[in-house]
Structure formats: C-alpha cells, structure tokens
Image (cartoon, rainbow, N blue to C red):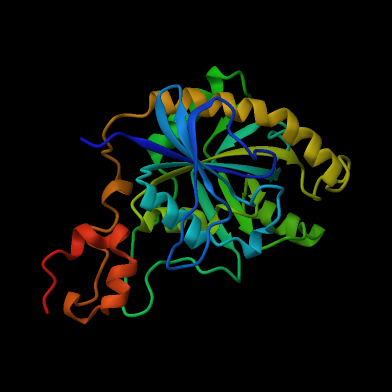
C-alpha cells in the first residue's frame, strides 16, 4: 500500500506552509507547460505534503492565466491523492460574514477562457461531476475547521467567475437570486481537472467581503480583503494540519475511480503521443491497448 500524500493549493493570503519538515523544492515539466511555481514537498506532522502557491510566489499570476492543467498534472505526477484548495471568496449571503470559513459542496462555472480538461488530441473522456467536491475530504475539512476554532459553514454553492475584476452590482444581485453562497475565481477548472485525474478535491473558502451587493457594507476593497486574509491564513494552516491527520489511509470515494467508465475512445485509435502525455492519469486503464 502506497503512502498517502496530500496536495495543498495556496490561494490569496496563503503563500507558504509553515510546519513542513524535510523540505524539497521540486520543479516539474508537464505536457501542458509549467506549473505556477516549484512544488514544496515535505512532511507535515509526519504526513507527506506537496504545497503549491497557486498564483506563484509573490502572487504573480492572475486567475485567468493560471496553468490549471499543469498544476493538477504535477500533483498527480508527484503521487498526490488528496488536494486541499484554499481560496478567498466574496460572501453572497448576510449570514456568511467576512472571516467565516465555508466548505462548499457545489459549483457554478462562469469562466470563459480556461482549458478545463486533459482529454483532447485524440481522446475523449466524460467524468461524472454532479458532486464536484469530494464528500469525504469536505467532511474532514469541516470537522478540522471547527477544531481550529473557525466559524465554519458546511455545504453551499461556490460560483467561479472569470475575473480578475470583481463583479458588477447587477451581476452580484443576479448571482444572489440563484441562491449562490460565495463567489471566487479559482475553483474551476481545478475541481474538474482533479476529478479527471482521480484526485480528491475540496476547498477551504474564506469570506473576505460581501462582494458589492451589500451596499451598507461598502464595495469590495482590496485593503480589507488583504487584512482579513492575513487573519484567516493562520486558521487555514491549523485546519490543514488537523485535516491531514484525519484522512483515511485508503480511499473509497467516487473520486478514486472517476475514470473507470469515462474513457470512450477506442484504445487502438488513441495517438501514442497522447498516451505518453496522459500516462500518469490514464495509465492503469490503457494497459493492453490494441495495436
């Protein structure tokens, strides 16, 4: 049985993972280009962890220009089976206050310019995505957040917008009419790609503002966002530390077998180059490919 390994995608406000020991910086090349930065691989309280600053060190890459495929592919290549995403979000409900933690269970995709699948260039796959976040990992993050002393909301819908601009007031009110709980810019296509790679994925979302629908609270201010992020980063790190210890040694969720019946292309017709590129993701399903 292989040792469990956890990936952490640090978002705005979380650029490093304190407590990591036996650290090694790993730079990877992928068929989809370079990841956002080097992966910082080490052990967090004995558990193997790969940390990647989603926007690069120094926050150099905007959400629309992140190489999501390379980031997730690199995690898969390293042997990661669980990914914890940490994200800053706007609250779309009065009851979710700035500083609160949300563990969403649903997504709405409003992005327009991001590749969101590994399956192109001669191969087609259709994974189930009805429940986009891993239920096992989400429950663990919820329990770990409570233990860390956070005000945590379990479940809710995360709307992923393109950005990098914040919403117009009309958009914000439209999304509220849909029943959306939080709004952010990064969870898609991360969740889609993680599911295709059979990696469990869940999010710790910290509300930093009320978007712009809440006129009494004022419009989104990057200064206020950064202040709340600084306060939330410590809570996120404590939550992750507790969560990695709570993960089971073996997975039994739907994420671990997402590709089992998803690949529909005749194996004999998949280009050799594509097979080589996707071997870390589809290798166990294409052994014995017809020539």
74 and 147: which is toward the camera: 74
Count of marks placed on residues: 0
100 and 20: which is toward the camera: 20
Q: Position of residue 265 (x, y in %)?
A: 24, 76
Q: Residue at coordinates 30% horizontally, 41% vertically from top-left?
A: 253
Q: Is residue 250 visible?
A: yes
Q: Position of residue 278 (x, y in %)?
A: 32, 65
Q: Residue at coordinates 33% horizontally, 61% vertically from top-left?
A: 127
Q: Quadrant of the C terminus?
A: bottom left
Q: Is residue 123 visible?
A: no
Left/right placement of residue 241 relative to residue 207 reads left
Relative vertical location of residue 172 with respect to residue 250 in this rendering, above or below:
below
Give residue 3's quadrant in the image: top left
Q: Residue at coordinates 50% horizontally, 25% vertically from top-left?
A: 241
Q: Quadrant of the N terminus?
A: top left
Relative vertical location of residue 121 with respect to residue 219 in this rendering, above or below:
below
Left/right placement of residue 221 relative to residue 273 reads right
Q: Position of residue 258 (x, y in %)?
A: 29, 54
Relative vertical location of residue 22 with respect to residue 175 in this rendering, above or below:
above
Q: Position of residue 116 (x, y in %)?
A: 48, 66
């Amino acid at each position: 049985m292989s040792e469990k390994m956890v990936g952490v995608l640090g978002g705005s406000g979380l650029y490093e993972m304190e407590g990591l020991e036996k650290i090694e910086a790993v730079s990877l090349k992928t068929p989809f280009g370079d990841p956002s930065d080097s992966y910082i691989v080490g052990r967090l309280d004995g558990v193997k962890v790969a940390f990647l600053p989603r926007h690069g060190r120094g926050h150099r890459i905007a959400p629309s220009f992140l190489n999501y495929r390379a980031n997730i592919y690199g995690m898969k290549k390293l042997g990661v089976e669980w990914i914890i995403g940490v994200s800053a979000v706007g609250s779309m409900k009065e009851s979710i206050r700035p500083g609160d933690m949300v563990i969403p269970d649903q997504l709405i995709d409003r992005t327009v310019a991001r590749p969101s699948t590994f399956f192109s260039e001669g191969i087609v796959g259709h994974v189930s995505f009805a429940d986009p976040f891993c239920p096992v990992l989400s429950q663990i993050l919820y329990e770990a957040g409570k233990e860390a002393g956070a005000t945590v909301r379990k479940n809710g819908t995360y709307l992923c917008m393109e950005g990098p601009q914040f919403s117009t007031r009309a958009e914000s009110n439209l999304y509220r009419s849909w029943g959306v709980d939080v709004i952010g810019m990064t969870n898609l296509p991360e969740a889609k790609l993680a599911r295709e790679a059979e990696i469990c994925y869940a999010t710790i979302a910290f509300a930093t503002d009320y978007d712009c629908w809440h006129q009494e609270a004022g419009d989104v201010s990057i200064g206020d966002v950064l202040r709340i992020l600084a306060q939330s980063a410590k809570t996120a790190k404590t939550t992750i530390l507790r969560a990695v210890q709570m993960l089971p040694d073996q997975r039994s969720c739907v994420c671990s077998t997402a590709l089992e019946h998803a690949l529909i292309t005749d194996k004999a017709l998949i280009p050799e180059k594509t097979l080589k590129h996707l071997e870390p993701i589809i290798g166990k399903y294409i052994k014995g490919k017809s020539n």
